Image (cartoon, rainbow, N blue to C red):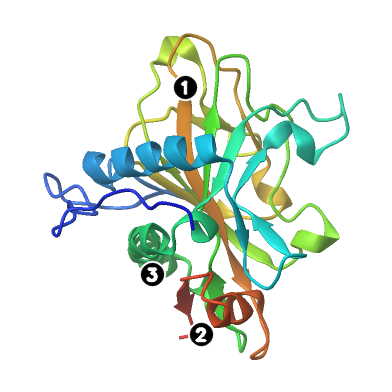
């Protein structure tokens, strides 16, 4: 069994309590500056480093079926096609407790987003976010190609993308998230949450990263999942997923 990181009896606050939080909107993009606490962001970074070093693989059914907890982004695409290079940890596989607490941050931000864009939940189908992927990008890396999050058939159920910056990156080092049609960029600052529609209206990319500070983010998607047999429910039945689950309002 994989050794879990030690935890104090009292966890640090999930949210930054030093400021009032108001989501700012720009053509479908919602931003909460410094929303998550610095302490929680550091916990996620430290957990990433520990689990990534172990190259976690979790056996959830038998000796022939494993869920990989870590991944190298460059292995997702054919050599030279998209130029991606990063390291990834799927937190819901590695540590369901950390994932469920992080989902509380995501869920509270989601509520602020849908107060503005109520159409996200105006459906007979449930909307849920059950994946929490932590990514580490070193200098020279990133995902520099313009893309959207539902740009393939297998991703067609993605409705809303969320991203949480886990550390500060100086402007001179690059590493911003650029949005093509909205003509805006967001520089990583610790605890800042960004949410946007997963479709072609919000093409985006990660700008080139330089310097000696790795970029850490947590990211995932709210998906529309019809019926009672969904990835989320299957994962929860296996004791492998803890999700933020929202029914239509």
Q: Above or below — where is 200 with respect to 93?
A: above
Q: Is residue 139 above or below residue 178?
A: above
Quadrant of res 168? top left
Quadrant of residue 111 within the rendered picture: bottom left
Identify the residue under disc 3. 115
Q: Earlier in the sequence, mark 3 or mark 1?
A: 3
The residue located at (50%, 55%) in the rendering is: 94
Chain-order first, disc 2 or disc 3: 3
Q: Mark 3 or 1, which is nearer the eye?
A: 1
Horizontal and vertical percent for residue 242? 46, 71
Point 55% across, 20% down: residue = 138
**Residue 19 relative to residue 191: left or right:** left
On residue 187, which mark appears?
Answer: none
Q: Is residue 113 above or below residue 29?
A: below
Alpha carbon of mark 2 to alpha carbon of mark 3: how far? 13 Å
In the visual, does 167 lie left or right of 179? left
Residue found 42% across the figure and 60% down from its top? 99
- Secondary element at image label 1: loop
Question: Residue at 58% of width from left, 82% of height from top?
Answer: 233
Q: Nearer the viewer, residue 27 or 155?
A: 155
Foreground: 111 or 96? 96
The spot of residue 24 in percent (x, y) is: 36, 48
Q: Which residue is mark 1?
A: 214
């Amino acid at each position: 069994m994989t050794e879990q990181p030690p935890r104090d009896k009292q966890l640090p606050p999930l949210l930054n309590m030093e400021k009032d939080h108001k989501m700012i909107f720009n053509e479908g993009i919602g931003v909460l500056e410094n929303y998550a606490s610095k302490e929680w962001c550091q916990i996620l970074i430290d957990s990433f480093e520990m689990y990534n070093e172990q190259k976690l693989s979790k056996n959830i059914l038998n000796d022939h079926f494993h869920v990989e907890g870590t991944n190298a982004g460059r292995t997702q695409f054919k050599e030279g096609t998209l130029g991606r290079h990063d390291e990834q940890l799927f937190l819901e596989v590695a540590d369901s407790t950390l994932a469920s607490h992080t989902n509380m941050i995501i869920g509270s931000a989601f509520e602020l987003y849908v107060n503005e864009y109520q159409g996200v939940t105006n459906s007979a189908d449930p909307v849920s976010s059950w994946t929490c992927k932590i990514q580490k990008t070193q200098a020279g890396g990133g995902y520099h190609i313009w893309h959207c999050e539902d740009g393939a058939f297998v991703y067609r159920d993605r409705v809303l993308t969320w991203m949480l910056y886990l550390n500060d990156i100086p402007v001179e080092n690059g590493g911003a998230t650029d949005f093509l049609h909205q003509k805006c960029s967001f520089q990583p600052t610790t605890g800042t949450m960004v949410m946007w529609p997963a479709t072609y209206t919000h093409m985006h990319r990660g700008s080139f990263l330089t310097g000696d500070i790795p970029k850490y983010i947590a990211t995932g998607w709210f998906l529309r999942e019809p019926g009672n047999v969904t990835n989320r429910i299957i994962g929860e039945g296996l004791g492998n997923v803890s999700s933020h689950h929202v029914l239509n309002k």
